[in-house]
Image (spheres, helix red, strand yellow):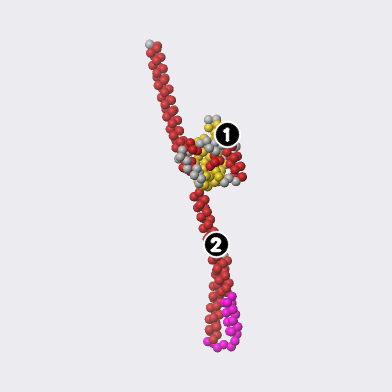
Amino acid sequence: INAVVSFIIAGMLSYHMMKDNFLKEKSLISSQRYLDSVYNTSLDAVFIIDVKNGLVTDCNTQSLALFGADSKSEMKKKKIENYFTQLSENSSELLNNALYDLAVSWKGELSCITHQGKIFAGYVSVVPLVYDGMMFKKINILDITDIRQAQAALQMAKEKAEQAVFARSRFVSNMSHELRTPLNGIIGAANILMQDNLNSEQKQYFDVLKYSSEHILWLINQVLDFSKI
């Protein structure tokens, strides 16, 4: 009887332990799937780097698409520096410090190169990562080529607009100056002629000439002031 009772108790304990382990394993699998989903659906290319040698130990799905690789095996065991190009002396020093100094995090823009030799502008962030007692660096790379092209196009449009405004203002200013000179001569000549003995009809004509000329001069002065503004 004791043996049977012990066997039943042992069986029940084993069942509960197996059930508990199954639930824990299921929870771990669910968490792992969630983390993998977040990791592989990121819009950034993510690399995990061994700080001892700078080699890629893992990467996400986006990194394959961004750098033109067919599988993770093509990316692993390669120096992360191979994915950057045209590094200046200052940028190279900053990147080395960010990769191999455990206390350093870094963000900035670098020129990246794919497996096919295509170069693109990348926004790179490097942060330390501790996993299972080992030190790594996590590198995120975002392709910002479209942003740079949009900024370049915007800058070009801005420069063209400024040139157009400058040319228009210069034209208006020059025209206003060229028009004022002969008008001043006309007004001055009209004033001199009006000092002579004129009959009423002639005086009326000269009054119209003087008024019209002065009015045109006033309009031109207004245009000139507007072009200065």
Cβ atoms at labels 1 and 2 below 8 Å apart: no
**Residue under the point 52% across and 35% down:** 77
Q: CA distance from mark 1 to mark 2?
A: 54 Å
Residue 150's x, y, as percent?
A: 50, 52
Residue 217's x, y, as percent?
A: 56, 74
Towards the viewer: 57 or 195: 57
Residue that mark 2 sits on: 163
Mark linked to residue 89: none
- Residue extending furthest toward the front: 116
Does the magenta-highlighted stretch encompass residue 190?
yes
Residue 213's x, y, as percent?
A: 55, 78
Q: Can you say whether 173 is above or below 22 in the image?
A: below
Q: Which residues are magenta?
A: 181-201
Q: Residues within 10 Å of mark 2 (few under 14, many from 20)?
A: few
Q: Nearer the viewer, mark 1 or mark 2?
A: 1
Residue 168 visible in rendering: yes
Looking at the rendered structure, the secondary structure element under dot 1 is: loop
Please tell me whether the stretch drawn in magenta is mainly helix, strand or loop: helix
Mark linked to residue 52: 1
Residue type beneath disc 2: Gln
Looking at the rendered structure, the secondary structure element under dot 2 is: helix
Q: Residues within 10 Å of mark 1 (few under 14, many from 20)?
A: few
Towards the viewer: 70 or 210: 70
Residue type beneath disc 1: Lys
Mark toward the start of the polypeptide (1 vs 2)? 1
**Residue under the point 53% across and 32% down:** 131
Q: Quadrant of the C terminus?
A: bottom right
- Residue extending furthest toward the top: 1
